[in-house]
Image (cartoon, helix red, strand yellow):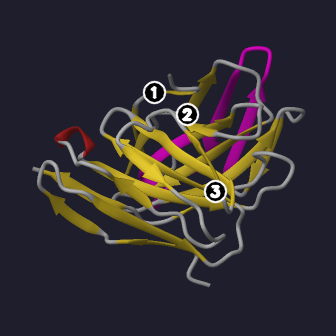
Amino acid sequence: NAGVTQTPKFQVLKTGQSMTLQCAQDMNHEYMSWYRQDPGMGLRLIHYSVGAGITDQGEVPNGYNVSRSTTEDFPLRLLSAAPSQTSVYFCASSPLQRGRDQPQHFGDGTRLSIL
Amino acid sequence: SQQGEEDPQALSIQEGENATMNCSYKTSINNLQWYRQNSGRGLVHLILIRSNEREKHSGRLRVTLDTSKKSSSLLITASRAADTASYFCATDDNQGGKLIFGQGTELSVKP
């Protein structure tokens, strides 16, 4: 199994551009989430989904959109990139059983720079 | 605001020594998890402890949970240079929807 796959691994954007970060998992996990990791800030939750067609906001959702049309995919869209969105983005997934008592499986991240 | 806060932020020890990292959180939880992150990689799950458990072991890892103090500790015994990484605690929000991570402890184990 590939686990959680994130693409691209690196990206440089100009301010105002839009782009989509891809996340796919092949473990049939219901729960998927996006985090951003900044120095000194740890991981902050952007958006999450408990199943196809269901999404919800995390701690820092502004400037990002998500959708969940299939169990496998959970893309993160930057609508109009800003330098403050320069970060490393991680996607994670887990089975949804009895709440949040399942380990999260992480991708290797997308390193995004906004100029 | 962050649910979990790790302490210390950075820890440097010699190979063979024990490393202890602490995590404090603010609200009631169903469980607490510890993760490890090697430089440039994603996080890897280490151990999960439920709110009705007080201690759990996995190999050289020992995790304790004190729900009255809203704190947890991760002990790595007989550390190795390969243990060099950042370690994060994560807690659920007791509502089934979110898993919130702390800021992490950066561990350096010198050979």
How many angstroms separate mark 2 from mark 3 (CA)? Answer: 20 Å
Residue B81 is covered by the magenta coloring:
yes
Few, some or many residues within 10 Å of mark 1 (<14, 14–19, 20+): some
Quarter location, residue B73: top right
Quarter location, residue B31: top right
The quadrant of the image that shows the C terminus of chain B is: bottom left
Q: Chain of mark 2?
A: B
Q: Nearer the viewer, mark 3 or mark 1?
A: 3
Report the label total: 3
Near-viewer residue (A5 or B55) = A5
Element on which disc 2 rests:
strand
- On residue A104, which mark appears? 3
Residues rendered magenta in the picture: B60-88
Asked whether the residues under the numbered discs 3 and 1 touch, taking CB atoms below 8 Å apart as contact, a structural biologist would say no
* Residue on which the image places disc 1: B8
Element on which disc 1 rests:
loop
Q: Is residue B64 visible?
A: yes
Asked whether the residues under the numbered discs 1 and 2 touch, taking CB atoms below 8 Å apart as contact, a structural biologist would say yes
Looking at the image, residue A21 sits to the left or right of residue A46; the answer is left
Residue B100 image point, x, y percent: 58, 36
Residue type pointed to by label 1: Pro
Few, some or many residues within 10 Å of mark 3 (<14, 14–19, 20+): many
Mark 1 or mark 2: whose residue is earlier in sequence: 1
Question: Measuring 76% from the left and 22% from the top, which residue is drawn there?
Answer: B28
* Residue on which the image places disc 2: B21
Residue B42 image point, x, y percent: 45, 60
Element on which disc 3 rests:
loop
**For residue B97, above or below residue A20:** above
Residue B2 image point, x, y percent: 52, 26
